[in-house]
Image: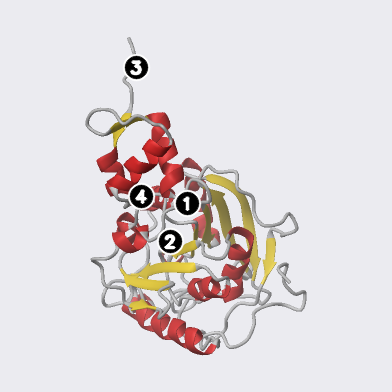
Amino acid sequence: MRAEVVTYKTSELAETFMVKESSINDYLTSQNIIIKEGGRISERDYQTVIDFVETQEKRIERALQKRKSEFTSKDKTVSIYQDDAISFLKKLPSNSVDVIVTDPAYSGMNNMLQLGEGRIVGKYADKGGDQGKWFSEFEDSEENYAAFLIECKRVLKRSTGHIYIMFDSYSLLSLGGIVRKYLDVKNLITWDKVNMGMGHYFRRRHEYILFATNGNKRKVKTKNIPDVWRFKRIHNSAYPTQKPVEVFQAMLYASAEPGFVVCDPFLGSASAAIAAMKSKCRFIGCDISDKSIQVAAKRIERFAQTGNDPLQPSSAVTVEGTFWE
C-alpha cells in the first residue's frame, strides 16, 4: 500500500505565514519549482517555502494589525498587548519569532507552599482572577503547559529559534520534563540570586532557566558562557516577581542579534523588553494583567526617552562582573 503523498496549498501557506500568496508563488517560480493544480506543492518544496518566509519582514505586524496594542514605542520596535499568553501566541504567524524569553507566573509553587501567613507572591485572599491584587497566575497543568509549548514551537523560526523558560524549583520538577516533548532541550541554567530568599527547608537563593532550540543547530554566541549566572535579586520591587534586566540580557547576549524579534508572552514588569531594547532587538510581549500593562508601558516609555530604567535604577551585576563584558 502506497503512502499518501503530503501536499500543501500556497493559499493556506500564505495565511499561516502571513505572506502574500503572490510572493510565495514568485519565489517558487524563481527556484524553478512547479506549482501543481490547485496551488499545491510537495513536502520538500514546503520546507523551501519556510526558508523564504522566515526572511520576510512585518509578518507579525500584519497578523496583529486588527489588534490595538496597549503600547507601541515611537520607533515601532516595541509593542505590548493585553492578552492571555496562549491566546496571544495563537495570533502570531508561524515561524516568525527568533527568541522567546519568558518567566511564566506559575500557580504551582503558590498553591503548594504556604510560608508564614501569606503566599510567596501576594496574599491568598488576593489570588488571581479579575479580583487579584496583581495578576492571574498561569494554571500550570500538564494540558495547559503542553498547549503553551506547542504554540511556542510553532511561532519560533526553524532557522534561528531559541527559547529560555524560567522555573522555580517546584515548577521545574512538575513541568520541566514536558518541554523535551516539543523542543530540543540543550541545558539548564541556574540563576544565583546572591542573597537568600524565603524557605522553611533550606532558604531559596536560586531559580532555573531551561534553554532549548526549535530543532535547529544554531549555537549560542560563545562557548565561554557558564551555566550559573550571578545577578542580585530585586528587593522592594514595584511589581511582584520582577526579575533583573541582566538575567534577560544574558539570554539575549547568547542567542540574539540586532534586529531579531524577541517575544515574552508573560510580560510582567517588562524586564525582558528593556533587555531587548538594550540589545537592539525588536520586542513583542503580552500580559493578561492590567497592572502589568500599566507598569510595563510607563517603564518602556521612560527608558526609551531617557535611557534610565525607573524600576531598576542600579545594576544587578555582582562584583564578579558579567560574561558579556
User: For the residue labelled by badge 1, is the local secondary structure a helix, a strand or a loop?
Assistant: helix
Mark whose residue sits in front, 3 or 2: 3
User: For the residue labelled by badge 4, is the local secondary structure a helix, a strand or a loop?
Assistant: helix
The CA distance from mark 3 to mark 2 is 44 Å
Mark whose residue sits in front, 3 or 1: 3
Relative to 243, does residue 258 appear above or below in the rendering? Answer: above
The CA distance from mark 3 to mark 1 is 36 Å
Q: Which residue is drawn at 56% across and 65% down?
A: 258
User: For the residue labelled by badge 2, is the local secondary structure a helix, a strand or a loop?
Assistant: helix
Q: Name the residue under label 2.
A: 108
Q: Do the residues labelled 3 and 2 touch (CB within 8 Å)?
A: no
Q: Alpha-carbon neighbours of circle 1 within 10 Å: few (<14), some, or many (≥20)? A: some
The CA distance from mark 1 to mark 2 is 10 Å
Q: Where is residue 34 in the image (x, y as percent from the top left)?
A: 35, 29
User: For the residue labelled by badge 3, is the local secondary structure a helix, a strand or a loop?
Assistant: loop
Mark whose residue sits in front, 2 or 4: 4
Mark whose residue sits in front, 4 or 1: 4
Mark 3 is on which residue type?
Ala
Q: Name the residue under label 1.
A: 175
Q: Mark 4 points at which residue?
A: 147
Q: Position of residue 46 (x, y in %)?
A: 39, 35
Question: Relative to residue 173, is residue 83 drawn left or right?
Answer: left
Q: Do the residues labelled 1 and 2 touch (CB within 8 Å)?
A: yes
Q: Mark 3 points at which residue?
A: 3
Q: Which of 29 and 174 is in front in this view?
A: 29
Q: Is residue 49 visible?
A: yes
Q: Which residue is drawn at 52% across and 70% down?
A: 276
Mark 2 is on which residue type?
Gly
